[in-house]
């Protein structure tokens, strides 16, 4: 093998330039495990170095070129052969040639647009990663590093309360109210249930948070419902005129921002599901969609200077052209 110029395969390592100071966050893998990854925001520069180490020093390594890529892609599990790339940046690090000793190559992707939040779901995965490649005649040497991207939003200008009356004629009539229709991921849902008419024997009432993931288009649409939380708000029979308070803390649950028609591939929506169960185990329920968003002002201090510049640029364009990121609420016309 060495005679033909192939040599032993080198080891590749990707190292971020600010890896020691950059924040890490937990993110669910496809297998359902939680692992920690470096956290980035839209507009931040991604820089570092590719370290190429020869396993056998002073042995010749021929290659057809070395490059590093920054990629954002969506993978639908029912169509694993096709990766839909929405970000693809390439830096050539070395022309075809040969090495006789280990080498280090610096790279920088400046002010990288990262329009969507990282997401791993039931039928779809949206990931960002760096990939270093040493091209060789027989087999390429490839090293990948995943990162996590969070999308930040400002406080929505319009955030009206939700108030509805539901019931069954001559049997049950209730009025429920939630203080807002849009909540950040660490928010508290405050509301109340008011019983106007009760002629069935209710023994239990709860609120569920349901995540609905939609993938595909046309006839190939898949809906996946996942109950994120069950919160009991009443145990026992209510009486007419009784009011039941609701206070549900979101911080303890695994939630993502609402995502709508991400790159025309998938959506993630959240619903509050009010469930009443009578003594004969019959279930009555009413669903109401709520919008979730990731609050930006908490992490502003940890964002890099590049991210702040990109944020100002985004806010400047949105005020004139009303530019909006697809996975943010329509009223969220800025990012911090």
Image: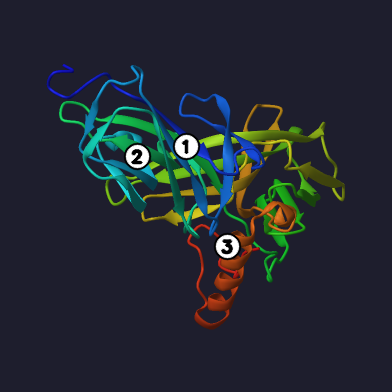
Residue 132 vs residue 118, the one in the foreground: 132
Relative image position of residue 10 (x, y in whole percent): 33, 24
Q: Quadrant of residue 211?
A: top right
Residue 307 vs residue 286, the one in the foreground: 307
Q: CA distance from mark 3 to mark 1?
A: 27 Å
Q: CA distance from mark 2 to mark 1?
A: 18 Å
Residue to which mark 3 is pinned: 329
Q: Are marks 2 and 1 in contact (CB under 8 Å)?
A: no
Where 65 falls versus 45 (above or below)?
A: above
Q: Are marks 2 and 3 in contact (CB under 8 Å)?
A: no
Residue at x-position 58% and y-position 39%: 38
Q: Could you tell which of marks 3 and 1 lies nearer the N-terminus?
A: 1
Q: Are marks 3 and 1 in contact (CB under 8 Å)?
A: no
Q: CA distance from mark 2 to mark 3?
A: 24 Å
Residue at x-position 73% and y-position 63%: 161
Residue to which mark 2 is pinned: 76
- Secondary structure, mark 1, is strand
């Amino acid at each position: 093998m060495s005679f033909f110029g192939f040599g032993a395969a080198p080891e590749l390592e990707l190292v971020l330039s600010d890896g020691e100071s950059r924040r890490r966050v937990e993110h669910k893998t496809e297998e359902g495990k939680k692992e920690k990854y470096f956290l980035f925001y839209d507009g931040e520069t991604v820089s570092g170095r590719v370290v190429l180490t020869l396993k056998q020093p002073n042995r010749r390594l021929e290659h057809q070129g070395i490059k590093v890529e920054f990629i954002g892609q969506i993978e639908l599990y029912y169509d694993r052969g096709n990766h839909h790339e929405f970000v693809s940046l390439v830096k050539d690090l070395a022309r075809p040639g040969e090495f006789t000793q280990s080498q280090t190559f610096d790279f920088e992707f400046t002010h990288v647009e990262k329009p969507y939040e990282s997401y791993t779901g039931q039928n779809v995965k949206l990931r960002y990663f760096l990939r270093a490649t040493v091209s060789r005649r027989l087999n390429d040497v490839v090293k990948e590093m995943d990162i996590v991207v969070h999308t930040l939003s400002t406080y929505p200008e319009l955030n009206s309360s939700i108030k509805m009356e539901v019931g069954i004629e001559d049997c049950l009539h209730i009025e429920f109210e939630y203080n807002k229709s849009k909540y950040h991921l660490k928010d508290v849902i405050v509301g109340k249930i008011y019983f106007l008419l009760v002629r069935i024997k209710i023994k239990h009432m709860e609120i569920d948070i349901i995540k609905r993931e939609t993938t595909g288009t046309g006839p190939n649409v898949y809906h996946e419902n996942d109950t994120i939380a069950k919160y009991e708000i009443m145990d026992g029979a209510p009486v007419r005129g009784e009011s039941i308070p609701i206070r549900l803390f979101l911080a303890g649950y695994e939630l993502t921002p609402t995502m709508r028609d991400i790159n025309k591939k998938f959506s993630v929506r959240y619903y509050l599901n009010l469930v009443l169960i009578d003594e004969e185990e019959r279930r009555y329920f009413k669903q109401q969609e709520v919008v979730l968003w990731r609050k930006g002002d908490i992490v502003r201090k940890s964002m890099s200077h590049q991210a702040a510049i990109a944020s100002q640029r985004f806010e400047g364009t949105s005020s004139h052209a009303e530019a909006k990121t697809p996975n943010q609420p329509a009223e969220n016309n800025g990012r911090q």
